[in-house]
Image (cartoon, rainbow, N blue to C red):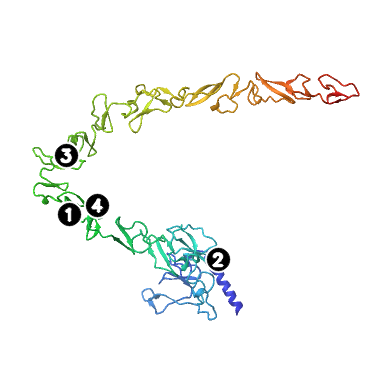
Amino acid sequence: MKKALCLLCSFLFVMLVIYCSVDYSLLENKRCDSEGKCLSGYICDRATMTCIKEGSLIHPDASTSEDAGEDTLDVKDVYVPDVEQDVGCIPTNNGKEICDGIDNDCDGRTDEDYVCGSCELASSISEPCNESTNCDRCFIINGERYSCVSFNGGDFSWMRESDIECDSSKSGKVVRCENICRVCDGTKYNDPFIINNEACDGKDNNCNGLIDEGDICGSDEICVNGKCVTKPCFGNEDCPTGKICKNQNCTICTDVTDDKLCGSGKICVNNSCIEGDCHQNSDCQNGICVSNKCCTSCCAKKEDCPSEMVCKKDIGKSIGTCETCIDFVDDWLCGLGYICENKKCIKGTCHPSRPICLPGMICVNYNCCTPGPNCCNNDSDCKANMICNAAHSCECKTLFGDCDNKYDNGCEKDLSSDVNNCGTCGQKCVLPNANQKCVSGICEIESCKPGFRDCNNNKSDGCEINITNDLLNCGDCNVQCLLDNADSICSNSECKIKACKPGFADCNGKVEDGCEINVMTDSDNCGDCGKRCPEPKACLNGTCK
């Protein structure tokens, strides 16, 4: 019996693995496809549109269709389990079914409530995890369930559920999935809520582990026990600028009913206390209300209107209305020193589109000016070798300079080739022992003076080597004057023997091999060149013995 049970469990586990490697959407207790199909061995319960095992449907109260001549069902199909509860089974996982190949709840079925759907058996996770990942999506790896969450304000990642289970050590910590937040309260998570901006309500609205943090109340308020409260006031002087003291609370004014609270000479307009004495014409005993002030002759002039508008009056009328200016024909209505541009009154004396200026002048930034250092529209408005920049000022072209500070002759120096103004005005090319030149604004060595060379290829120190007397560069760069057994000297770019070292002599007269003879041991030159020892004597310490 035990052997048979083992074989049955093995078969069920193998079938589970096979099922989890195919289309998970067609397994038992999963949705049928759009054509009402399931995998082999399963049929679609069309009452619930879920896949169940074959033979699990019963058809009570079947009736016959007289019109079609075939049996049809007049009631919904009913699902009946085909396996009875296993009496000898010992529940695992507290009797809750999970996807592990075991009948955890001992109902004779394996993994029936939780298999291979949104929670997938896998050996690794390849899907990305971010704030838009579905909360129901999870993976089971080696019996451990992984979900996509952000824990306590960290980055979104796949985490083992055992690592985010709520316990007393995580009290107050938060777990976020998609746009849903939960807070650990001792041993369980509270009801999930949708993430929102932080508000003064005693809750962690933005799911960052902090409650009622930041500036969430008014400038004169603080958040206390989930409510924004203010300190009592006794006059407007106790309140911030722009607020009034109303019922011992600093607040903005509401409407005309708060005019008196604004103080003498002020009224409430658009929730602000401003200087004024009227809201509408009926508030004025005489005249009309203009800019919240009663005026008997409004608008009589431009100043009675907002700055960008003009006062237009009918012929023969002294009072007009504030209107938007149209174009240059309304320049005079904008006032002296102003013009109408883009239907607004702005400071200026001319229009770029209609540059009406005196002869010899141009219109720049809505003002007439004589072309010069700070007045240009095009390069042609500037002097020689100059351009007109975005600020409408003349500046030198690249590698040209105004070295005499005279605008009339433009940028007269070519800084690309002038050795006295190389790259910038006054920058002279002075390279030691060299004839210099200026190339693209950089000082270069044109040639070295006689007897000198640039051996380090560093133009900044010019031709730094005197090859007429340098032992390491004698006659040319890197030509060494270091003769064997001799004190060498470089003279007039030639390497010479200054003196032979003790015990040596230059017997062949050739400079290149230095003092080639050891007169202390050479029997043909014993003690000096040409002194030969007669046989059988030998030369010892410069003496024939």
Which tag, 1 or 2, sits closer to the chain's start?
Answer: 2
Which tag, 4 or 3, sits closer to the chain's start?
Answer: 4
Q: What residue type is labelled 1?
A: Asp
Residue 505 placement, left or right of 273: right
Spatial CA distance of label 1 from label 2 is 74 Å
Q: What residue type is labelled 4?
A: Gly
- Dot 2 falls on a residue whose secondary structure is loop
Residue at (60, 78) in percent of width and height: 2
- Residue 142 is marked as 2
Spatial CA distance of label 3 from label 1 is 28 Å
> Mark 3 or mark 1, which is nearer to you?
1
> Farthest residue in the right direction?
536
Q: Nearer the viewer, residue 287 or 316?
A: 287
- Residue 489 is marked as none
- Dot 4 falls on a residue whose secondary structure is loop
User: What residue is disc 1 on?
Assistant: 259
User: What residue is disc 4 on?
Assistant: 242
- Dot 1 falls on a residue whose secondary structure is helix
User: What residue is disc 3 on?
Assistant: 302
Q: Quadrant of residue 322?
A: top left
> Mark 2 or mark 4, which is nearer to you?
4
How far from the left and from the top, in percent, is residue 320?
12, 41
Residue 60 placement, left or right of 471: left
